[in-house]
């Protein structure tokens, strides 16, 4: 006889990429593609051929705030990366250089993946991002470069990822 499975918790700890279900809907993504080219008034990114890209401004383009700038204006991150531990205190400049380098590379290729803020948090740092893939990338980069412990908590209902890295 089968027993009923309990409903899953809102936050699901894990490390597997399959937990990033593409069926999870980001509330900041448009429900339908824009009908024509558009330019974000805040950052200048251009919507062209069905996606946001770093291009020269398109003449007569509509003005539409991009999802990343919308998140920034609303102060609603998609990703949180908490960095703690004595190692983080002693190597803060190194860690920040790694994070900023990764973020610059990702932003150049994927305009919606940006760091919103880097702020002190207790004895460490809190990095907030506009995209959960960037948060995951930062956590993976820290673990790959410096080892330590990395924990993931994905909230499918809110399209939110919280990572905690400690060494």
Image (tube, rainbow, N blue to C red):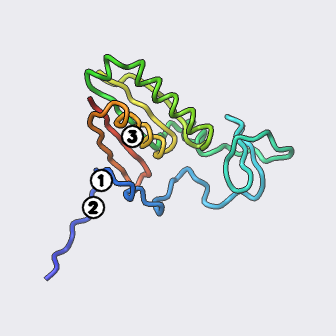
Left or right relative to 38: residue 100: left
Place of residue 145 in the rendered image (x, y in percent of width and height, measured from the top left): 37, 32
Q: Which mark lies nearer to you, 1 or 3?
A: 3
Q: Residues within 10 Å of mark 1 (few under 14, many from 20)?
A: some
Residue at 39% from the left image edge and 40% from the top image edge: 140
Place of residue 93 in the rendered image (x, y in percent of width and height, measured from the top left): 42, 18
In the rendered image of this protein, does residue 83 appear above or below residue 51? above
Residue at 27% from the left image edge and 57% from the top image edge: 9
Front in this rendered view, residue 106 or 35: 106
Q: Residues within 10 Å of mark 3 (few under 14, many from 20)?
A: some
Q: Residues within 10 Å of mark 2 (few under 14, many from 20)?
A: few
Residue at 37% from the left image edge and 26% from the top image edge: 125
Q: CA distance from mark 1 to mark 3?
A: 18 Å
Place of residue 112 in the rendered image (x, y in percent of width and height, measured from the top left): 59, 43
Which of the two discs, 3 and 2, labels the residue nearer the N terminus? Answer: 2
Q: Which residue is mark 3?
A: 140
Label 2: state its secondary structure. Answer: loop
Front in this rendered view, residue 70 or 163: 163
Q: CA distance from mark 3 to mark 2?
A: 25 Å
Q: Which mark is residue 12?
A: 1
Q: CA distance from mark 2 to mark 1?
A: 8 Å
Labelled pair 2, 1 in contact (Cβ < 8 Å) = yes
Q: Which residue is mark 2?
A: 8
Q: Which mark is residue 51?
A: none
Left or right relative to 27: residue 30: right
Q: Which mark lies nearer to you, 3 or 2?
A: 3
Label 1: state its secondary structure. Answer: strand
Left or right relative to 129: residue 65: right
In which quadrant of the rendered image does the N terminus lie? Answer: bottom left
Place of residue 37 in the rendered image (x, y in percent of width and height, measured from the top left): 77, 51
Which residue is at the far left? 1
């Amino acid at each position: 006889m089968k027993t009923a499975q309990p409903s899953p918790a809102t936050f699901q700890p894990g490390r597997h990429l399959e937990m990033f279900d593409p069926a999870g809907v980001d509330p900041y993504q448009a429900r339908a593609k824009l009908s024509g080219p558009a330019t974000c008034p805040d950052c200048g990114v251009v919507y062209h051929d069905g996606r946001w890209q770093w291009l020269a401004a398109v003449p007569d383009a509509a003005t539409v705030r991009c999802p990343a700038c919308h998140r920034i204006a609303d102060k609603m991150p998609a990703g949180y990366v908490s960095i703690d531990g004595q190692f983080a205190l002693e190597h803060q400049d190194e860690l920040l250089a790694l994070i900023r380098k990764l973020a610059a590379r990702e932003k150049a290729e994927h305009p919606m993946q940006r760091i919103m803020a880097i702020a002190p948090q207790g004895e460490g740092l809190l990095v907030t991002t506009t995209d959960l893939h960037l948060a995951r990338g930062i956590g993976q980069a820290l673990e790959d470069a410096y080892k330590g412990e990395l924990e993931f908590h994905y909230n499918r209902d809110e399209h939110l990822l919280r990572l905690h890295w400690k060494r």
